[in-house]
Image (cartoon, rainbow, N blue to C red):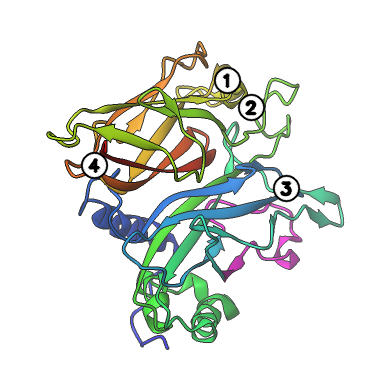
Amino acid sequence: MLSMRRRLPISLVVPLVALLCACQAELERVSEVTKLRILGIQADPPEIAPGESTALRILTADPGGEGRRVVGGGIVVPGLFTPSSSPDTSTLPPLFYALPFTDVNDSGVVVFPHHLGMPSYYSDQGAQVPIAPPGEPLVMTAILFVCAGDGFDEDAAYAVMAQISMGGAVEEAGPDAFLEICSEAGADEGITALKSFDVVTCDPENSALACDGEYAQNANPEIESIALAGEPLSQFFGGQCFECDPEDGCREPLALRGYLTPGSFQRYERSLASNLDQTEVVYERTYISWFVTGGTLDEDRSGNGSTADDVAPDDPFDANWIPPFEGGEFTLWAVAHDIRGGVSWNIYRFSAGASQ
């Protein structure tokens, strides 16, 4: 179980865990997937209001795991989420959730079985909802764990999580309490990542947002198509083979080209950085992060020609992939992002080799 150690306040957990994750990522190129990785975390929807709910999913990869068990779990902490100044807030429900450990599916995705609901607060004076600074969303942060290994013991993991989450202990837990959950439960290895999502209160009396139809609640961007060397890729289709020279092997870079759906480029209202009391309406920026199990990508992520003032859904997201000389079987992940926390992904499988 948890060993005794000096505890740190929860306000220090997020930056320390983020630092540890950053150090892990620097050991290999971002787009290169050779070991257990978290490639994306999705909240669906990525932005909610009090009284609404969201669902979390984790995209994992374990190319060297040889089919071992991989599970994900986590804890959601309030972050900047604070109730209004109502005198009755001491009796309101805590904004804290423990996410159960759940097995990855055949695509390496952890789908948590329950939605996270944001309660609407009530007091004797009527409805009370959390209020953010003018024009700014409130933030919830999920600290997520992925554990890999056939020896993983769910009961032991739940016992460790219970020690952290019950009786207010989460506010005293240091980063080691989260990072060691996998090893305490007998897993071979484990990794930790963060996911933040916004809780937006559209209240004209307390926010600079106009709440008059200009504000668009964020939705996850969607990938419309991905092509490799001019050939459209199909998700989970393993029969596509890209030919290499019989004598020289695979040397030539193959062009990757992706498009997002037009609806992925949302127009929304945001506060000015120079003056939070004023707003502007802009298009959100988007990009695709690429991940592959072999070869080399010249770009870890790709944007297109869209700007905050103009949207260009017909402009592609481009990169080049050079297969390893000997070819082989590969998995490619395309993970779409927008700057408001929206995430989605597609997974493709194909091969490259000398023609017979």
The residue labelled by disc 4 is 295
Local packing at callout 4 (Cα closer than 10 Å; few below 14, some 14-19, many 20+) is some
Local packing at callout 3 (Cα closer than 10 Å; few below 14, some 14-19, many 20+) is some
Q: CA distance from mark 1 to mark 4?
A: 48 Å
The residue labelled by disc 3 is 50
Q: Is residue 28 above or below residue 90?
A: above
Which element type, helix, strand or loop, lies under badge 2?
loop
Q: Is residue 92 magenta?
A: yes
Q: Which residues are magenta?
A: 78-101
Q: CA distance from mark 1 to mark 2?
A: 6 Å
| Labels 1 & 2 near each other (Cβ < 8 A) | yes
Q: Tag 2 or tag 1, which sits nearer the N-term? A: 2
Q: Which mark is residue 208?
A: 2
99 or 118, which is in the foreground? 99
Residue at x 34% of width, y 59% of height = 63
| Labels 2 & 3 near each other (Cβ < 8 A) | no
| Labels 4 & 3 near each other (Cβ < 8 A) | no
Give the quarter of the image for residue 324: top left
Between tags 1 and 4, which lies in front? 4
Local packing at callout 1 (Cα closer than 10 Å; few below 14, some 14-19, many 20+) is some
Q: Which mark is residue 305?
A: none
Q: Which mark is residue 278?
A: 1
Q: Is residue 170 above or below residue 229?
A: below
257 or 313, which is in the foreground? 257
Residue 227 in picture, x, y percent from top left = 43, 27
Residue at x 66% of width, y 27% of height = 209
Between tags 3 and 1, which lies in front? 3
Q: Amino acid at mark 4?
A: Gly
Q: Tag 4 or tag 1, which sits nearer the N-term? A: 1
Which element type, helix, strand or loop, lies under badge 4?
loop
Q: Tag 3 or tag 4, which sits nearer the N-term? A: 3
